[in-house]
Amino acid sequence: MQKLSSLTLPWPTDWAALFGVERPLIVEIGFGYGQFLLHLARAHPDASIIGLEIANRCLSHVEAQIERRGFTNARVIHSTAETALHHLFQPASIGQIHINFPDPWFKKRHGHRRLMQRDTLDVMVNRLAPGGMLYLATDILEYAEMSADLLAATPGLDNTLEKPWAAALPGRALTRYEGKAARAGRACYYFACRRNHLPPPFIAPVKELDMPHLVIKSALTLDTIYEAFTPGQHQTGGIYISFLYIYRSRNVLLLEVYVKEPTIDQHVAFLLSERAPNEFSLRLSTLGHPRPTPGLHAAAGLLGEWLMSLHPGAEIIKQAVKD
Ligand SMILES: C[S@@+](CC[C@H](N)C(=O)[O-])C[C@H]1O[C@@H](n2cnc3c(N)ncnc32)[C@H](O)[C@@H]1O
C-alpha cells in the first residue's frame, strides 16, 4: 500500500479518485493503534474511512492491519489533523469526524498545541457536510469542560445530547486508550454534535504557489557564504522561520530550514549552487517533500536578502519569490 501524507497528497485531495469510488467520508483524528478505525471500516462498508495520525509506529501498525483484513474502504494518512483538515478536505465534504482521547497530557497552559481549540474547531465545522456529526471522547474532566464551553459557542454545531456530554454512548466501540481508562476506573465524557445549516466559519483557501527560485550575481564564493552563515529565527505575518544549519558539498550549499505557518509545519532544505562564475541559484531541494506555500516563499525571500547583504555589489537577476 502506498504511504500517504499531507505533504505528498494533492491539495485538496480527490478522495473518490484515491478510493476509486465516490462515498461519504468518515475521518478519525489521532487513531493511535486503530481499534476504533478498524471498527469504523467494518461498520461502514459504504463509506471511505480516513485516519489522521502523527505517530509513525501507529501508522505502520494500522496500515498493516488494514491490509491484513483486506479493508479497501480505509486509508491512514501521516498528518496533523490541522494540516489535513485545511489542505486535504473541501468545505462541506465530511460526513463524520471522530476524536478519541486527544491531548492526554492536557494542561491549560498548553492551549496552542491542543486539538480542541477555536481555529481547529472552525475548520472542522467548515469541512463537515450539513447533517454531519462530530464525536469527541475524553477522560479528562477539565478537557470535557473546556470542550463543552467551546462547542456551546459554536453556532454551526447542535448538541444532540440532553446534557453537554454523556457518560456513555450506546453501541460505541472501545478504543485502546478508553480500555485503559476503564481498567484504571476513570470516567469518560462523550460529545456528539450535528452540523446544522447555519453558514460555516470562513476558512481562508490554501494557496499553493510555484516553487520559489532566485538567481543572484555576487562576487562571493560558496566558501565565504558558508562561513558567513549563522542560525537565526524570524517571525513575519504569522509565519515563523528558523534557519538551522548549513552544509557544504563540492558545488552546493544546503540550508536546512524550518517553517511554521498557521496550517502547516515544513522542515525543508534550500540549495545554493554556483551556476556560472559569480552567479548563484537558490532553489528548494526535494528533501522533505516541500510544498510551495507562502511561508517557503518568505524563507526564500529572507535568504535572498541575507545573500544580498553579504556583498555591496550583489544583484538579483531573477526572482520568482512571492511577497
Ligand atoms: C491518547 S492517544 C489516543 C489514541 C486513540 N484515539 C485511542 O483512543 O486509543 C492520542 C493520539 O492522537 C495522536 N495525535 C496527537 N496530536 C495529533 C494531531 N494534531 N493530529 C493527529 N493526531 C494527533 C497521537 O499521536 C496519539 O496517537
Image (cartoon, grey):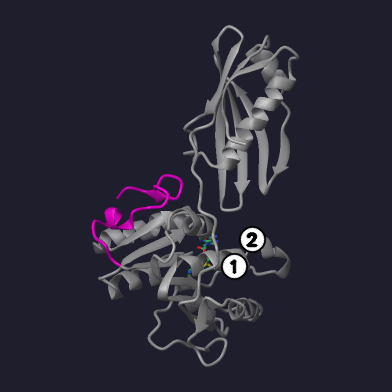
Question: Can residue 54 be seen in the rendering of this structure?
Answer: no
Is residue 114 located in the magenta-colored stretch of the structure?
no
Circle number at residue 113: 2
At 45% across and 77% down in the image, what residue appears?
A: 197
Q: Position of residue 104 (x, y in %)?
A: 59, 69
Screen quadrant of the C terminus: top right
Tell me the CA gap for discs 2 and 1. 9 Å
Q: Is mark 1 within 8 Å of ligand 1?
A: yes
Q: Is residue 47 left or right of residue 8?
A: left
Question: Is residue 295 toward the left or the right of residue 36 in the image?
Answer: right
Query: Residue 84, how many percent across, how many down?
Result: 47, 56
Q: Earlier in the sequence, mark 2 or mark 1?
A: 1
The image position of residue 6, as x and y in percent, is 45, 50
Q: Is residue 135 left or right of residue 260?
A: left
Q: Amino acid at mark 1?
A: Asp
Seen at 41% across and 44% down, the residue is 8
Q: Main secondary structure of the magenta part?
A: loop
Observer-side mark, 2 or 1, equals 2
Residue 126 image position (x, y, % from top left)? 49, 66
- Judging by the rendered image, the residue that carries numbered circle 1 is 103
In this view, 145 is above or below 35: below
Residue 64 visible (yes or no): yes
User: Going by the picture, which residue comes out furthest to the bottom?
Assistant: 162
Q: Residues within 10 Å of mark 1 (few under 14, many from 20)?
A: some
Q: In percent of the image, x 61 and y 24: which residue is there?
A: 247
Q: Nearer the viewer, residue 296 or 77?
A: 296
Task: Judge by depth and name the residue closer to the eye, 196 or 160.
Answer: 196
Whether tag 2 and tag 1 are in contact, CB under 8 A, the answer is yes
At 42% from the left and 66% from the top, the residue drawn is 92
Q: Is residue 106 above or below residue 185?
A: above
Segment colored magenta: 1-23
